[in-house]
Image (cartoon, grey):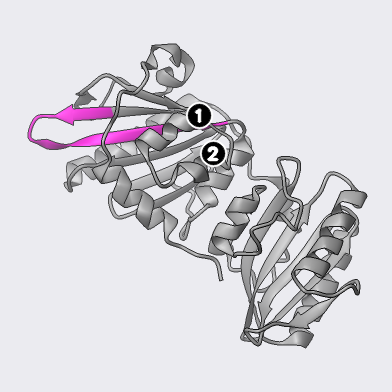
Amino acid sequence: MIQYDFFVFLSIILVFQVFIAPASAMDNGIQKDILPAEINAWGMGQQDQVYKGKEIYRYIDGAGEVYLAFDFQDVIVRRYSLAGAPDIIVELFRMSSPENAYGVFRHDCQNETNEVGRGCERRGGLLCFWQGDFFVCIYAEGESEKAHQAITALAHAIEVKIQDSTGKPELLNLLPENGLQENSIRYFYSPAILNYHYFISEANILKLDKNTRCLLANYTIKDHSFLFFLGLYPSTGEAAEAEKSFILEYLGQTDQDSFKLLENDLWTGVRRSGRIVLIIFDAQDLNVAKAFLTSASESIKE
């Protein structure tokens, strides 16, 4: 099943991180204008900090590779202060596209709501949401009702400034609805992110790159659970190569539409529909898994 520890880890490092010689925010005028100068009497406490590209390792060492896997561009960090109240920190992560902002938001999201932006999640005092090219995280360095209200107000103020109504990736429409555990959905194209959630191989046997688009999601059908992978490739030929590679390298077989009972006593199988590769991992029941893949491939009609 999909792992869920990244968001918890991120929450910890956001609170205890050390800022090391960040770049000036003056060259990020457009992004900087998205952040209000004050909110609910909290005002800017320090100069904004900016980290670009691989500089993100200096800011959140240990999780930087996740952001880079979603084509991270830069992050602006702003601290808001109010006498007698905890400081509020906002992080404005800019990705290269809305779909990458969605991907990093969904990376460990467990309870998505529509409270702010195109998708939002709260965990304790941490609020994160995505909209347009941006993934935004806001938290207070201490708990208080006023800080909680200010965090909410700040999130809505940023949401209004972004002014981008781009929706979720259309690939999501290909996920079968029956049995879908919606909070388990992951969206990505990097083999490193796939291996984070479900280890496949040190080698990139599914031939993933920036031109592919992938989904992972948990399903439960008739009390039987499994993990479902859906990968969209630029061409039918590339999808066929990925399918062939998976069958040979992962299943150790050569037959098409293969299913195999692996060492964990669970079934894994693959099927292709045009440019789309469909894989079921860790299925408890072979008949349920085969029926699911058949139905999914027929509904796609690639």
Element marked by disc 1: helix
**Quarter assignment of residue 250:** bottom right
Q: In the rendered structure, which segment of residues is drawn in magenta? A: 79-95
- Is 296 positioned to the left or the right of 53 in the image? right
Check disc 2 and report its element: helix, strand or loop.
Answer: helix
Q: Residue at x 51, y 46 (%)?
A: 66
Distance between the alpha carbons at the discs numbered 1 and 2: 7 Å
- Closer to the chain start, of discs 1 and 2, is 1
Q: Nearer the viewer, residue 107 or 39?
A: 107
Give whichever of 101, 164 is nearer the camera.
Answer: 101
Q: Position of residue 235 (x, y in %)?
A: 89, 46
Q: Nearer the viewer, residue 211 or 263?
A: 263
Residue 132 visible in the current orientation: yes
Residue 251 at x, y percent in the picture: 77, 74
Q: Quarter of the image containing the C terminus?
A: bottom right
Q: Where 32 falls versus 232 (above or below)?
A: above
How many labels, in total? 2
Image coordinates of residue 73 in percent, x first then y, are 53, 28
Based on the displayed image, in which of its 4 quarters is residue 116 positioned?
top left
Whether residue 88 appears in magenta in the rendering, the answer is: yes
Tell me if 93 is positioned left or right of 192 in this view. left
Q: Residues within 10 Å of mark 1 (few under 14, many from 20)?
A: some
- The amino acid type of the residue labelled 2 equals Leu
The N terminus - image quarter: bottom right
* Residue 193, numbered label: none
Q: Residue 272: where, in percent of width, then height?
A: 86, 63
Pointer 1 with pointer 2, Cβ within 8 A = yes
Residue occupying the point 65% across, 84% down? 263
From the image, tell me which residue sits under label 2: 68
| Secondary structure, magenta segment, majority class | strand
Q: Which residue is mark 1?
A: 53
Q: Taking the image as drawn, is residue 116 in sight?
A: no
